[in-house]
Image: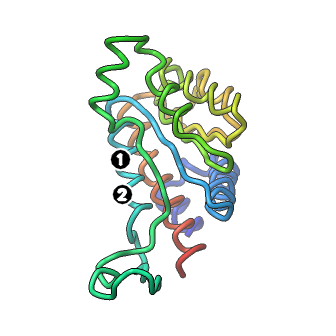
Amino acid sequence: MLTELLERYPKLLSCKDDILRARETLIHCYKKKGKLLLCGNGGSASDCDHIVGELMKGFLLKRKVDDKKIPENIREHLQGSLPAISLSAHTAFMSAFINDVEPSMVYAQMLYGYAQPNDVFIGLSTSGNSANVVNAATVAKAIGIGTIALTGKNGGALSETCDVAVRVPETETYKIQELHLPVYHYLCAEVEKHFFE
């Protein structure tokens, strides 16, 4: 799949090693029964929701559920799941915390509340300098979970904070986002293949 990704998006060749490191980080997370926690703003928040959708249900593969504890009539309508939570999707909590406490710490607070050993954090920021995303990454590092950044060419503070930084080689927001999508589709497909093929 990596060969196909790089043939379709040759600009991503500069990110190849970091994409592979992100893949291994995610596989390790799920092998250890961890979950993925993601956040971003605007279009990057939508990307977080998109990633959750690819991981929590079948993406390219059928993910049959064989758990006999679940009644068959229900089980036949379920799919194997790789747990992932988009922190950007918690509207009521976010509005309360932003109003009552400190807006730039909203994702850090959720990360602190949800994170467990073996989890992984992914922060998406085209500039790499979104304060609320960088603060969440800082908390993730402090409590010892894996961290991955998806940014643009310049990387910003987020890429300096995270264990793995995929800096796609663009500087304009929409062009960065256009390259983030094939990167995370590749990651979701590879992780799914590892656990469900």
> Residue 194: x percent and y percent?
60, 73
Between 46 and 112, the one nearer to me in the picture: 112
- 111 in relation to 37, above or below: above
- Alpha carbons under labels 1 and 2: distance apart: 6 Å
- The crowd level at tag 1 (other Cα within 10 Å; few <14, some 14-19, many 20+) is many
The quadrant in which residue 43 appears is top left
- Label 2 residue SS: helix
- Label 1 residue SS: helix
Judge from the rendering whether residue 137 lies leftward or rightward of residue 177; answer left or right.
right
x 47%, y 27%: residue? 107
Mark 2 sits on what residue?
A: 53
Image quadrant in which the N terminus is located = bottom right
x 42%, y 83%: residue? 64
x 42%, y 33%: residue? 40
**Residue kind at label 2, given as amino acid type:** Gly
x 54%, y 82%: residue? 197
> Residue 103: x percent and y percent?
40, 14
- 37 in relation to 71, above or below: above
- 120 in relation to 7, above or below: above
Judge from the rendering whether residue 65 lies leftward or rightward of residue 154; answer left or right.
left
**Residue kind at label 1, given as amino acid type:** Asp
Judge from the rendering whether residue 97 lies leftward or rightward of residue 105; answer left or right.
left
Pointer 1 with pointer 2, Cβ within 8 A: yes
What colour scheme was applied to this rendering of the protein? Answer: rainbow
Judge from the rendering whether residue 65 lies leftward or rightward of residue 16; answer left or right.
left
- 145 in relation to 100, above or below: below
> Residue 162: x percent and y percent?
66, 33
Mark 1 sits on what residue?
A: 49
